Image: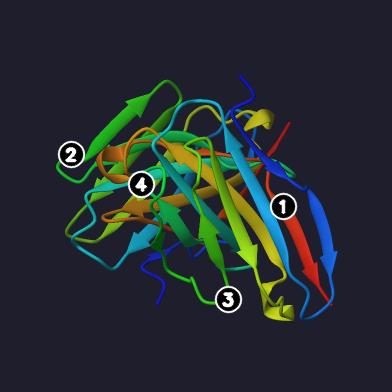
Amino acid sequence: DQQVKQNSPSLSVQEGRISILNCDYTNSMFDYFLWYKKYPAEGPTFLISISSIKDKNEDGRFTVFLNKSAKHLSLHIVPSQPGDSAVYFCAASLNDMRFGAGTRLTVKP
Amino acid sequence: NAGVTQTPKFRVLKTGQSMTLLCAQDMNHEYMYWYRQDPGMGLRLIHYSVGEGTTAKGEVPDGYNVSRLKKQNFLLGLESAAPSQTSVYFCASSYLVSQGGNEQFFGPGTRLTVL
């Protein structure tokens, strides 16, 4: 069973606008949530994380929001840049790490 | 620092053949992991290791074996390859376990095709 789900396989936004990537999870025991970014032919790289006791974490253009009651988190990228075009994986950790299927973000100039 | 490296980058096997994927890290990380990535499935943990000489099963361990004889190396073995093992394999390492939001550092991946 997939405990972490990213229901949008792809997202396209205009440069300078906001990108919002969504992630849902089923296990309320997850204690940390992370976002990874992946370019073609490379391994994923860590982007930002949030503890389950917080509802927001911000790092430059990237902000992650956590809604525990809805078991939902989202990654906001503002402003979006063409270099942000990549596949974004949501992950949740407890005893190990569970990943979503990924969302391919395309930022158009 | 090379970070996490994986050997080989690509491999084609016939059903029933065996092979070993090598992962090496130069960051002195205690924890190492093997994942597979399949379309629409994200990354799934195969096996992991919390230190030299230790290994543990992940989410999808069947058909794979691992060894961690040296702290910097983590080997993934396929004893009798099957077409269902066609995938992209990623190795990762971290200072601490995935808990606590500690990031994992990933290698570039190995693309394996089993005919």
Which quarter of the figure is the C terminus of chain B placed in? bottom right
| N-term-proximal mark, 1 vs 3 | 3
Q: Which residue is mark 2?
A: A54
The numbered mark at residue B110 is: 1
Instruction: Identify which residue is drawn at 60% across, 58% down.
Output: B76
Q: Which chain letter goes with mark 1?
A: B
User: Which kind of residue does numbered mark 4 sit on?
Assistant: Val
Seen from the viewer's position, the closer of residues A76 and B30 is B30
Residue at mark 4 shares a chain with residue at mark 3: yes
Question: Is residue A81 visible from the viewing direction of this image?
Answer: yes
Task: Name the front one of labels 3 and 2.
Answer: 3
In this view, the mark in front (2 or 4): 4
Q: Pointer 4 and pointer 1: residues touching (CB < 8 Å)?
A: no
Q: Secondary structure at mark 1?
A: strand
State the image coordinates of residue B66 (x, y, percent, origin top left).
53, 59
Identify the residue at image location x=76%, y=62%: B112
Which residue in the protein does label 3 denote? Answer: B63
Residue B6, above or below A98: above
Horizontal side of residue B96 vs B9, given as left or right? left
- Asked if badges 4 and 1 are on one and the same chain, I answer yes
Q: Amino acid at mark 1?
A: Thr
Q: Rounded to the nearest whole Å, what is the CA distance between mark 4 and mark 1?
A: 22 Å
Q: CA distance from mark 2 to mark 4?
A: 28 Å
